[in-house]
Image (tube, rainbow, N blue to C red):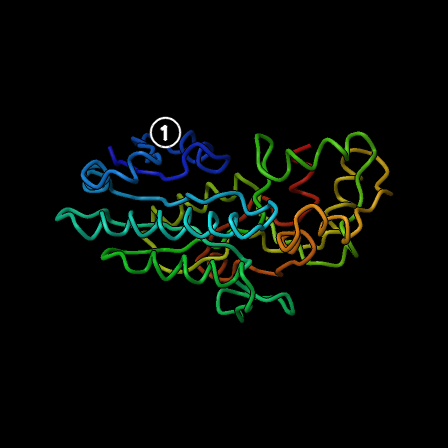
């Protein structure tokens, strides 16, 4: 029986991964905050694990005060640093570290595969630094750059569904901003695909056909048979989230070229298929 250790195992993606791999016959070990700050215990876990999945990180959709930016940084970089230090300190190392990043690493001016141009803003620099830290691990490393993960049991979709069900949904800002997303089932299967094939690379974890915020809004309205006439003005989001509103008002158009080239098959290729399956 193979063992998978997961940081951030209590979150939406982490919980989904834990349930998924336990059903696949893996032993799954959650690495919580206390373990991350206990060198000996962390070393014991990584040395007895075949795969380590790093998901830890504070929620990016929030008001970006100076203090919260520091939390976004420390919850990603410091956590990854502790994990990498533990891996490098033990004689028996995991076969593969899969660390997380985001398509927010790219600028928002084009459609990008994994070799896309990076932005120069806070989120992109955070992702770049996060990936650099993971690559210091003295074992095989893969990076998963997430789009917005859509699933029934948590994450962004659960939060946006209620206003749409009430007929209060609408576009955010202009609605023209790119929206790169992935169905939770495809995300889970991509982890299995990379682990089963022992792949080492950087992957965009997004559906093959990205959409826009308007495309998402229309898909939700169609699936729920509800009007979508209540736009959320950009200035209102900036009042609530300050600089953090960029996550909602800007967007990255990312495609999963490497996964597709390797033969991975997505079950949900576009936004309407994805939304219909979740609604």
Q: In the rendered view, does 254 fall on the left or right side of 40?
A: right
Residue ranking furthest to the front? 66
- Image quarter in which the C terminus is found: top right
| 144 or 168, nearer to the observer | 168
Q: Residue furthest left?
A: 91
Please provide percent x and percent y for residue 195. 34, 47
Question: Residue 118 vs residue 76: left or right?
Answer: right
Which class describes the residues within 10 Å of circle 1: few (<14), some (14-19), or many (20+)?
A: few
Report the side of 219 relative to 28 (left or right).
Answer: right
> With 248 as the anchor, is 95 left or right in this view?
left
Number of labels in the image equals 1
The residue at 55%/68% (across/down) is 119
Q: Residue at x 41, y 43 (%)?
A: 56
The x and y percentages for residue 255 are: 57, 60
Q: Is residue 61 above or below residue 44?
A: below
Nearest the eye: 90 or 178: 90
Give the camera-side residue of 3 and 1.
Answer: 3
Circle 1 sits on which residue?
A: 22
Assign the N terminus to one quadrant of the image: top left
Q: Secondary structure at mark 1?
A: helix
Q: Is residue 98 above or below residue 254?
A: above
Picture coordinates of residue 174, whole percent (x, y): 79, 57
Position of residue 158 relative to residue 202, above or below, is above
Where residue 106 appears, as percent x and y from the top left, is: 55, 64
Residue sitting at x 67%, y 51% = 248
Give the residue drawn at x 34%, y 56%: 134
């Amino acid at each position: 029986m193979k063992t998978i250790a997961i940081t951030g195992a209590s979150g939406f993606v982490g919980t989904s991964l834990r349930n998924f791999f336990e059903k696949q016959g893996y032993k799954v070990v959650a690495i919580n905050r206390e373990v991350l700050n206990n060198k000996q215990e962390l070393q014991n876990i990584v040395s007895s694990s075949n795969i380590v999945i790093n998901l830890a990180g504070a929620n990016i959709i929030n008001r970006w005060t100076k203090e919260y930016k520091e939390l976004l940084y420390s919850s990603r970089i410091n956590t990854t640093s502790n994990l990498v230090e533990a891996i490098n300190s033990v004689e028996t190392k995991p076969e593969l570290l899969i660390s997380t990043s985001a398509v927010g690493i790219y600028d928002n001016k084009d459609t990008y595969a994994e070799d896309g141009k990076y932005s120069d803003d806070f989120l992109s620099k955070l992702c770049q630094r996060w990936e650099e830290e993971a690559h210091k691990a003295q074992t095989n490393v893969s990076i998963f750059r997430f789009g917005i993960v859509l699933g029934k049991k948590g994450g962004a979709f659960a939060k946006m569904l209620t206003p749409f069900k009430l007929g209060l949904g609408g576009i955010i800002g202009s609605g023209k901003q790119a929206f790169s997303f992935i169905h939770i089932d495809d995300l889970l299967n991509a982890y299995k695909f990379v682990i089963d094939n022992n792949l080492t690379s950087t992957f965009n974890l997004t559906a093959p056909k990205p959409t826009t915020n308007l495309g998402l809004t229309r898909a939700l309205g169609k699936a729920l048979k509800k009007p979508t006439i209540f736009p959320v003005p950009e200035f209102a989001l900036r009042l609530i989230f300050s600089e953090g509103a960029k996550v909602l008002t800007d967007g990255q158009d990312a495609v999963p070229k490497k996964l597709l080239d390797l033969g991975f098959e997505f079950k949900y290729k576009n936004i309407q298929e994805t939304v219909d399956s979740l609604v």
